[in-house]
């Protein structure tokens, strides 16, 4: 493998030029209306962009996707609600829980990891679980 530190070896991109995303990059999805968040087959970043509170559902991950990470972030100042009936392991009494309610703030987010047919909550920012 030969590498280079010279900037001239990496030409600047011109407007309209297409580039390839690395295979290791997570998928990116956007949801602008109520509905179901697709259960990912690989690491995914999902953005909630509905101007008012979105009512979303999230199904159980297959065992074949154990370890896949799903990061869901609010792009609007709305109290989005994700319902994943008895699928959210938040590390608290009563887990698995069923709903994740986002604070009405841009940037509220939750990071989930698929494990044994459920979602383990890795981290949250402005999200409460019931």
Image: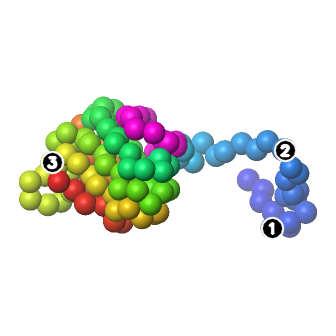
Of labels 3 and 1, earlier in sequence is: 1
User: Which percent across, then down, holds residue 63?
Assistant: 28, 33
User: Label for residue 16?
Assistant: 2
- Judged from the image, the secondary structure of the residue bearing numbered disc 1 is loop
**Magenta stretch containing residue 35, yes or no?**
yes
Q: How crowded is the residue under tag 3: few (<14 C-alpha within 10 Å), some, or many (20+)? A: many
How much space separates mark 3 and mark 2, taking CA atoms?
47 Å
State the quadrant of the C terminus.
Answer: bottom left
Left-right relation of 116 to 55: left
User: Label for residue 5?
Assistant: 1
User: Which percent across, then down, holds residue 66?
Assistant: 32, 41
Q: Nearer the viewer, mark 3 or mark 1?
A: 3
Residue 66 visible to the viewer: no
Of labels 3 and 2, earlier in sequence is: 2
Q: Relative to 110, does residue 41 appear above or below in the rendering? A: above
Query: Which residue is painted at 9% across and 54% down in the image?
Result: 94
- Judged from the image, the secondary structure of the residue bearing numbered disc 3 is loop
How much space separates mark 1 and mark 2, taking CA atoms?
26 Å
Can you identify the residue that label 3 sits on? Answer: 96
Q: Relative to 107, does residue 96 appear above or below in the rendering? A: above
Left-right relation of 24 to 17: left
Whether the residues at callouts 3 and 2 have beta carbons within 8 Å, the answer is no
In the depicted view, which residue is nearer to us: 38 or 44? 38
Query: Which residue is painted at 47% across and 47% down in the image?
Result: 50
Q: Magenta residues, as a range?
A: 29-47
- Judged from the image, the secondary structure of the residue bearing numbered disc 2 is loop
Residue 78 visible to the viewer: yes
Q: Nearer the viewer, mark 1 or mark 2?
A: 2
**Magenta stretch containing residue 30, yes or no?**
yes
């Amino acid at each position: 493998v030969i590498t280079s530190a010279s900037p001239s070896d990496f030409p600047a991109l011109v407007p309209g030029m297409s580039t390839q995303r690395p295979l290791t990059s997570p998928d990116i999805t956007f949801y602008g209306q109520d509905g179901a968040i697709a259960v990912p087959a690989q690491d995914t970043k999902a953005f909630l962009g509905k101007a008012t509170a979105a009512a979303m559902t999230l199904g159980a991950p297959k065992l074949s996707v154990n370890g896949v990470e799903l990061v869901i972030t609010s792009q609007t100042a709305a109290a989005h609600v994700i319902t994943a009936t008895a699928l959210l392991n938040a590390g608290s009494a009563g887990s698995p829980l069923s709903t994740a309610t986002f604070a009405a703030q841009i940037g509220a987010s939750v990071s989930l990891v698929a494990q044994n047919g459920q979602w383990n909550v890795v981290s949250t920012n402005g999200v409460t679980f019931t």
